[in-house]
Image (cartoon, rainbow, N blue to C red):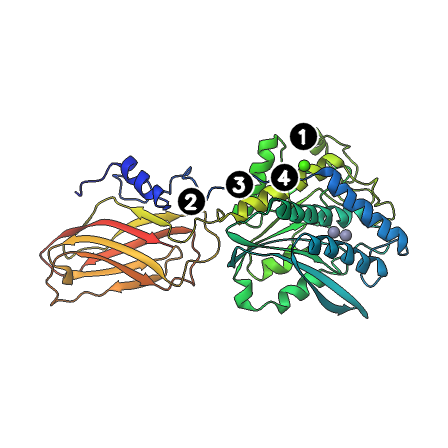
Amino acid sequence: MSLLPSPRTSSALLLAAGLVVTAFAPAVQAVPALPDAPAATPTLAAPDISLTHVKAHLARFSKIAADNGGSRAHGRSGYKASVDYVKAELDAAGFTTALQQFTYDGATGYNLIADWPGGDSGQVLFAGAHLDSVTEGAGINDNGSGSAAVLETALAVSRAQYKPAKHLRFAWWGAEELGLIGSKHYVDKLASTERSKISGYLNFDMIGSPNPGYFVYDDDPTIEKTFKDYFAGLGVPTEIETEGDGRSDHAPFKKAGIPVGGLFTGAGSKKTAAQAQKWGGTSGQSFDRCYHSSCDTTANIDETALDRNSDAAAHAIWTLSAGTTAPPAGTTYENTADVSIPDNGAAVTSAVDVSGRTGNAPAALKVGVDIVHTYRGDLTVDLVAPDGTAYRLKNAAGTDSADDIRTTYTVDASGETANGTWKLRVQDTAAQDTGRIDSFRLTF
Ligand code: DTR
Ligand code: CA
Ligand code: ZN
Ligand code: ZN
């Protein structure tokens, strides 16, 4: 049995090195990473997003609609005026902005993309909202609310001169109301190499409904937890957003395999008595009685909901961009429990549970193997991915009479989901000589 270092000492040393450490356990089966293992990158708290500022953007959207025939719909002058307003705010705040044009229904549409300079261009945290309204009205809740919250959060990034680990990108989409046209166009035009750089897309569509519910998208667990933890901190219960699968601009990103999340306060569906009990408001009444109607004006906003969701958006953007959505590269998951290898017998395994990561494992996954054995030529060694796929690390080799295997293999595991139970499988295929697995670790 190896002399196990004291968990505390080893954990402290490894944590100091920014590595996440699984607990040291006498049992053979894996132990999950320490649930409260602190993230390697400290998270700066997001600033409070000013409701006054968000409402000021809504007032501008309202005036734009009034000055442009009553709406901010795709193909109408009110939409382009909305784009010009948001773009001017962002240009003045130091963002790198770009207009992406597309044509739909015989009219030119525009996506406004804004990049905040800096951060790891290989890890992009993306937040967006559709800027267009329906033709019936100004579209203040749908979706001036999301557009204004995302704009004010972007401006808060500039005011704070925030420098997160990840690169921040923001977007205001065109022609969502006609079928997610602008966001679909953006994702369609995005090269696969660029898609893989997006660690998450956060969508904000209707976040100030006058009879609000607090709904959190449940598409990606890490993003969902980030939002739910925020509202738990406010003492505000949330529900999973079930109405929207495919019904807003996160859908094209999700379809492209990008982790998505977002917030929603409800549209035409009616609030139940149970929901009114927990959130207040009026049961039996729509969350937004002016959904897609001319009465979707600045009076069609619940300010508390708008403020809470704006602050939640900022919290998620600060948290998920600080490199904490997934433990940073170089994170190790280890199992140091000894596992005896039966002589000329059945295979045995040592397992580690990987969690809290997004996407797939890397193309250069490091597999650390410490096996004590008096004739390593007897042994076959495999890495087994969470879905059961086996990667042969070492074949048996009768002539290799040396002792022990203490080495690190590099495996292209990019086809495997990162999270799950990974196993080291070892089999002694020849009689005589025995040994044990001393430890097994994965470094992402
Ligand atoms: N499609 C959105 C409104 C909408 C309806 N259900 C959901 C769910 C999640 C986000 C948005 C929506 C629109 O009319 O813009
Ligand atoms: Ca606020
Ligand atoms: Zn909408
Ligand atoms: Zn709508």
* Vertical side of 366 occupied by 48: above or below: above
Q: Within the image, what quadrant is residue 107 found in?
A: bottom right
Q: Which residue is mark 4?
A: 239
The residue that label 3 is drawn on is 44
State whether label 1 is within 8 Å of ligand 1: no
Q: Nearer the viewer, mark 3 or mark 2?
A: 3
Q: Secondary structure at mark 1?
A: helix
The residue nearer to you, when weighing 381 against 96, is 96
Q: CA distance from mark 4 to mark 1?
A: 11 Å
Q: Which one is closest to the eye, mark 4 or mark 2?
A: 2
**In this image, 421 relative to 203: left or right?**
left
| CB of mark 4 near ligand 1 (< 8 Å) | no
Residue designated by label 2: 40
Q: CA distance from mark 3 to mark 2?
A: 13 Å
Q: Are marks 4 and 2 in contact (CB under 8 Å)?
A: no
Residue type, mark 3 in image: Leu
Residue name at image x 52 percent, y 62 percent: 196
Label 3 – label 1 distance at C-alpha: 31 Å
175 or 41, which is in the foreground?
41
At which x and y percent is residue 268? 77, 45
Residue 309 got which mark? none
Residue 279 horizontal/vertical position (percent) = 69, 32
Identify the amino acid type marked 2: Ala
What secondary structure is marked by label 4?
strand
**Which mark is in front, 3 or 1?**
3
- Label 3 C-beta lies within 8 Å of the nearest ligand 2 atom: no
Task: State the residue position of label 1.
Answer: 278
The quarter of the picture where residue 415 lies is bottom left
Horizontal placement of 176 versus 324: left or right?
right
Q: Badge 4: how crowded within 10 Å, few (<14), some, or many (20+)?
A: some
Q: Nearer the viewer, mark 3 or mark 4?
A: 3
Q: Is residue 260 visible?
A: yes
